[in-house]
Amino acid sequence: MDMKSGRLNTQDNAALQELVDTFDMLGDWEERYRYLIELGRKLPPMPEAEHSEANKVRGCMSQVWLAGEVGDGARLHLRGDSDAHIVKGLIALILALTDGRTAREVLDTDIKAAFAQLGLESHLSMNRRNGFYAMVERIRQMAATAVAG
């Protein structure tokens, strides 16, 4: 993160740069919401068995599930789903920034800064923001567990 600007260094994360470029190109928020919904539609289906209480994210108004495992090289392999279209898009956004990265990279990524840089901080309801941060915290916990051993 660039401490002077408070912006995430997009050079370190090609997925974030692509999202920033796309959001900038789209312009108005109605188009950006449609794009988020489209991202959610492109998520691979989460197995029904993973729609469990253990994978449920607390703090979300919608139903949200996140699951994953740590693979070779301590890389996180994550899956998520929601019953709300925009929330599913937010899951896709988070996974674009975290899935396939090492646990240490995930912990070193300031996802909240990415969220702000995309302009989502000021364009989502308080409940959706809180849910987003609950999802981020769940993934950070998975990464911290992987780093710890």
Image: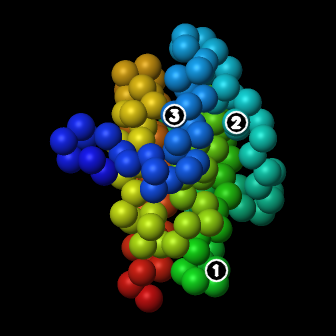
- Mark 3 to mark 1 CA distance (whole Å): 28 Å
Instruction: Give the mark nearest the N terminus, 2 or 1.
Output: 2
Residue identified by numbered label 1: 71
Asked whether 34 or 56 is in front, the reply is 34
The residue drawn where x is 65% and y is 38% is 88
Q: Position of residue 47 (x, y in %)?
A: 80, 59
Residue identified by numbered label 2: 39
**Residue 105, picture quadrant:** bottom left
The residue drawn where x is 51% and y is 34% is 20
On the question of residue 62 being in view, the answer is no
**Label 1 neighbourhood size at 10 Å, few (<14), some (14-19), many (20+)?**
few
**Residue 20 numbered mark, or none:** 3
Q: Nearer the viewer, mark 3 or mark 1?
A: 3
Q: Position of residue 93 (x, y in %)?
A: 58, 42
Q: Secondary structure at mark 3?
A: helix
Specify the amino acid type for callout 3: Val
Q: How many marks?
A: 3
**Label 3 neighbourhood size at 10 Å, few (<14), some (14-19), many (20+)?**
some
Q: Position of residue 126 (x, y in %)?
A: 38, 26
Q: Position of residue 65 (x, y in %)?
A: 62, 52
Asked whether 138 or 8 is in front, the reply is 8
**Residue 29, picture quadrant:** top right
**Label 2 neighbourhood size at 10 Å, few (<14), some (14-19), many (20+)?**
some
**Quadrant including the C terminus:** bottom left
Specify the amino acid type for callout 1: Gly
